[in-house]
Image (spheres, helix red, strand yellow):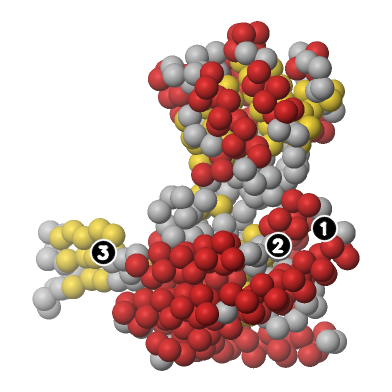
Amino acid sequence: MNDMDVRGMMAAIGEAARMAAAELAFAPAESKRHALNAAAESVDASVEAIIAANAEDMAFGRDKGLSAAMLDRLELNAARIAGISAGLRAIAAQDDPVGAVIAEWDMPSGLNIRRVRTPIGVIGVIYESRPNVTADAGALCLKAGNAVILRGGSESFHSSTAIHGCLIAGLRAAGLPEAAIQLVPTRDRAAVGQMLTMTDHIDVIVPRGGKGLVARVQTDARVPVFAHLEGICHVYVDAAADLEKARVVVLNAKTRRTGICGSAETLLVDRAFLDRHEVIIRDLLNAGVEVRGDADIAKISGVTPAQDSDFGTEFLDMIIAAKVVDGVDGAIAHIRTYGSNHTDAVITEDDAVAERFFQRLDSAILMRNASTQFADGGEFGMGAEIGIATGKLHARGPVGTEQLTSFKYLVTGDGTIRS
């Protein structure tokens, strides 16, 4: 497509989204619930078609030279598709956030004031690789009363299109406007540029992808952005850590799925713990992880000496940087220097250490004695998420339905006038 065609197409999509958002703002909760449950039924009935579409994307991804971790993010199988439909049903079952009273109070003037949740309007979601984001983002935006414009990655084009068809079937079944959830129907990168400047049509952009995508969005967007920067997640194993808890948490945090943003990328180990328990490093090596260690950890057979650039890198692969630190303050200093304010974990039985870690770090998610792989809206009880926001304004951490709302004030008087 040429630039004029893309510009015209995106303007039409944006206008349709605005009109749909106006209807969704007062759509009954039951209609949205019906749409999501019907979409889940459509996904269940379309497993073979979705897998066939995904096979085309996997072939495209291999030809494009995607890494094994990125191909894992792209791949859909029966179990993952079942997870998509389960996520749709979980979001459907949640309380509707629109109209919920956040706070209410009476003033001496006689006014009653309520602050209530209201839809943001039109959300633009730009994402890479993971086709399940099509369902998660579409469902969460709908539940929050927003229209959404989805622009998936070129490598997930066919899978996203198949899943989007199921969402449209749900909207149709519930009598809601089909323009409530639109998928940009082209791989042309010019569509992304258009979305970033559609201030008349889009209220907020949510980027979900690698550093390059997020950096471009933050640099070029004229529309407000819910930033999701890199997932440079740390696990700090304290001197007072329980060995068995540390072993299982560290291994899970790195190896369960290496290609997700909650995967641990740096292991920090208190010197006193490592002196007693080198097994924490050997577990990773035995699992096939390339451990890039500082001078102390590199003394362990099988460890690769780390480069300075390894600390602060999001590997999204079977690689982890590892460093010895002197106590929790050493870990905090390292994370402040190299972290991305995403998710960081401490393994310790010492309450004072955990409290210090929680108080002195400002990551969106801080964990104690738990795997960073829990950094996920579904695991937080949100049904799903659009992403993990690492900024500090409006949305932070998993972006679920409540984070996709704003609020307004409803003020009631009785002939009340101001003196």
Task: Nearest to the eye among marks 3 and 1: give it.
Answer: 1
Residue drawn where x is 55% and y is 70% of the image: 135
**Is 283 positioned to the left or the right of 138 in the image?**
right
Residue drawn where x is 40% and y is 54% of the image: 381
- Please tell me whether mark 3 sits on a helix, a strand or a loop: strand
Q: CA distance from mark 3 to mark 2?
A: 39 Å
- Please tell me whether mark 1 sits on a helix, a strand or a loop: loop
Q: Earlier in the sequence, mark 3 or mark 2?
A: 2
| Residue 115 seen anywhere in this rendered image of the structure | yes
Disc marking residue 101: 3
Position of 296 relative to 110 (above/below) = above
Q: Earlier in the sequence, mark 3 or mark 1?
A: 1
Q: CA distance from mark 2 to mark 1?
A: 10 Å
- Please tell me whether mark 2 sits on a helix, a strand or a loop: helix
Instruction: Specify the amino acid type for callout 3.
Output: Val
Q: Position of residue 56 (x, y in %)?
A: 77, 74
Disc marking residue 74: 2
Position of 37 relative to 288 (above/below) = below
